[in-house]
Image (spheres, helix red, strand yellow):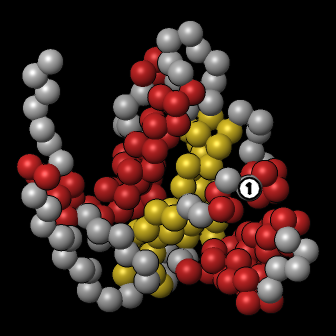
């Protein structure tokens, strides 16, 4: 697939089924992530893969975090939290590793990790792998971060859900460039 085709036609694919990406496909996903813009060559990211039975354990972690924040959390909300990681055969947790640096502020490192996540999405699309980027409250939950082994200097940027598209991909909407671009003349 041509690079511009991937950039112009990538869409989120929320309905994913087995099989998960192969080892060779994953290698390309992560190689693409590692090409993200990286001022200072800090490599301010790392990735966790979650699949198989680990998805169920992640769902339990999500439910426990929900209960810790609300002891009266409804059973329906707990069930939803448990099922979140089961929506795809593979999850990639994209983590920003924020480092003290005189010329590269934390915000820039966080954005670089986001670019790495986007690289994974583009590489997935180019290989015919379905993918969707999700976050939500549990991406910013301290108990979830601890349960996933994040350090004090790390932040979850994305939960990327990957697998085989359950159905045909939708066409991306055509947006008018001029609605988003203007000249600044001082």
User: Height in image: 152 above or below 49?
Assistant: above
SS type, badge 1? loop
Left or right: where 55 falls relative to 177: right
Please identify the quadrant where the C terminus is shown: top left
- According to the image, label 1 marks what residue? 141
The quarter of the picture where the N terminus appears is bottom left
Residue 117 seen anywhere in this rendered image of the structure:
yes
What's the residue at 75%, 69% (across, down)?
62
Residue that appears at 50% across and 18% down: 104
User: Is 176 or 111 nearer to us in this picture?
Assistant: 176
Q: Is residue 130 left or right of residue 94?
A: left
Asked whether residue 92 is in view, the answer is no
Q: Position of residue 22 (x, y in %)?
A: 45, 68
Please state which of residues 64 and 91 is positioned toward the viewer in this rendering.
64
Q: Position of residue 29 (x, y in %)?
A: 41, 54
Query: 166 left or right of 174?
Result: right
The answer to which quarter of the image holds residue 92 is: bottom right
| Residue at 45 percent of width and 50 percent of height | 117
Residue at 57 percent across and 27 percent down: it is 106
> Residue 58: image x %, image y %?
73, 69
32 versus 58 height, above or below: above
Give the percent coordinates (x, y) of residue 124. Answer: 35, 62
Q: Which quadrant of the structure image shows residue 128?
A: bottom left
């Amino acid at each position: 697939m041509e690079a511009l085709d991937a950039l112009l036609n990538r869409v989120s694919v929320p309905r994913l089924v087995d099989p998960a990406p192969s080892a060779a496909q994953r290698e390309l996903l992560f190689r693409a992530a590692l090409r993200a813009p990286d001022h200072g060559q800090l490599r301010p990211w790392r990735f966790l893969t979650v699949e198989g039975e680990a998805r169920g354990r992640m769902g339990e972690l999500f439910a426990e975090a929900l209960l810790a924040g609300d002891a009266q959390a409804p059973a329906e909300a707990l069930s939803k939290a448990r099922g979140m990681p089961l929506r795809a055969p593979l999850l990639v947790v994209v983590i920003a590793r924020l480092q003290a640096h005189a010329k590269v502020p934390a915000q820039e490192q966080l954005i670089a990790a986001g670019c790495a996540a986007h690289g994974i999405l583009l590489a997935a699309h180019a290989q015919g792998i379905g993918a969707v980027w999700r976050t939500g409250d549990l991406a910013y939950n301290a108990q979830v971060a601890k349960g996933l082994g994040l350090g004090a200097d790390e932040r979850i940027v994305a939960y990327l859900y990957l697998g085989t598209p359950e159905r045909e991909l939708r066409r991306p909407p055509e947006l008018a460039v001029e609605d988003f671009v203007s000249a600044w003349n001082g």
